[in-house]
């Protein structure tokens, strides 16, 4: 695999690692909706899919017939598939850089504020007034918590209302940065530098353009 393919495959992954690491270093908990979280993950994997299974199983007859335009068709199909997965996935909320016990208290306060009939059963929370049933999935080492939907019957408007109210409460909560976020930022930065240097050194045309812009 040439250096351009390495860059296409791993540069989005490096950026994803740096973004997630930055979220874990924030001074306040950061909430992402399930759509935002899946979209961010999907974009980070697009390069790997293109240079991996997409190129491996590329129909040669289609390439001969359409030429380079086949890549545009395949990328559009990939985007449609990713969009379909995101739109049909059950709702969820992902909260970065907050302890599970701290988030549970904030979730409980938010739930009672929006629905007086809200009730807990272990780590499960039911909000009949909002048409929601969710389960708290914690990653204590990373101080990240996911609120995942339980069952197929969910009110998406209720999830949006709950997510906005929870985000407002989290914005008023101050937390210490998660030191492990530095690991992700450093790993992402190192990976991005490695593939970028490989492109500049392994591709003479790119190196020539770079020399004209930044002489050294």
Image (spheres, helix red, strand yellow):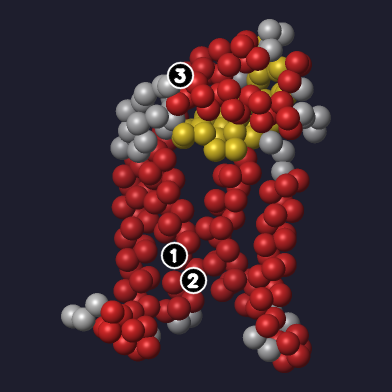
| The C terminus, quarter of image | bottom left
Chain-order first, disc 3 or disc 1:
1
Alpha-carbon neighbours of circle 1 within 10 Å: few (<14), some, or many (≥20)?
Answer: many
Q: Which mark is residue 8?
A: 2
Alpha-carbon neighbours of circle 2 within 10 Å: few (<14), some, or many (≥20)?
Answer: some
Chain-order first, disc 3 or disc 2:
2
Q: Secondary structure at mark 3?
A: helix
Q: Is residue 1 left or right of residue 188?
A: right
Residue at the (69%, 36%) spot, across then down: 91
- Marks 2 and 1 sit apart, C-alpha to C-alpha, by 6 Å
Residue pushed farthest left? 216
Residue at the (45%, 78%) spot, across then down: 4
Residue pushed farthest bottom? 64
Query: Toward which corner of the image does residue 159 lie, by quadrant?
Result: top right
The residue tagged 1 is 11
Give residue 98's position: percent from left, percent from top.
43, 27
Q: Which mark is residue 102?
A: 3
Q: Is residue 193 above or below residue 209?
A: above
Q: Are marks 3 and 2 in contact (CB under 8 Å)?
A: no
Query: Toward which corner of the image does residue 202 lie, by quadrant?
Result: bottom left
Query: Toward which corner of the image does residue 61 lie, by quadrant?
Result: bottom right
- Marks 3 and 2 sit apart, C-alpha to C-alpha, by 39 Å
Q: Are marks 2 and 1 in contact (CB under 8 Å)?
A: yes
Is 213 in front, or is 2? 213
- Marks 3 and 1 sit apart, C-alpha to C-alpha, by 35 Å
Give residue 45's position: percent from left, percent from top.
56, 60
Residue pushed farthest front? 213
Alpha-carbon neighbours of circle 3 within 10 Å: few (<14), some, or many (≥20)?
Answer: few
Residue 60 in view (yes/no): no
Residue at the (72%, 61%) spot, across then down: 80
């Amino acid at each position: 695999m040439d250096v351009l393919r390495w860059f296409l495959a791993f540069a989005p992954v490096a950026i994803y690692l740096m973004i997630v690491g930055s979220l874990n270093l924030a001074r306040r908990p950061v909430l992402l909706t399930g759509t935002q979280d899946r979209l961010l993950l999907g974009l980070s994997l697009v390069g790997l899919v293109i240079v991996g299974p997409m190129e491996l199983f590329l129909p040669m007859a289609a390439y001969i017939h359409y030429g380079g335009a086949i890549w545009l068709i395949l990328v559009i199909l990939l985007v449609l598939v990713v969009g379909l997965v995101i739109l049909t996935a059950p709702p969820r909320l992902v909260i970065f850089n907050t302890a599970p016990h701290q988030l549970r208290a904030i979730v409980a306060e938010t739930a009672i504020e929006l629905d007086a009939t809200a009730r807990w059963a272990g780590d499960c929370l039911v909000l009949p007034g909002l048409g929601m049933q969710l389960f708290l999935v914690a990653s204590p080492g990373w101080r990240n918590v996911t609120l995942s939907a339980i069952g197929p019957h969910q009110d998406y408007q209720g999830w949006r209302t709950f997510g906005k109210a929870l985000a407002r409460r989290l914005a008023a909560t101050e937390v210490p940065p998660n030191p492990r976020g530095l690991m992700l930022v450093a790993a992402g930065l190192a990976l991005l530098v490695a593939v970028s240097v490989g492109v500049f050194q392994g591709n003479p045309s790119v190196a020539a353009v770079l020399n004209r812009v930044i002489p050294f």
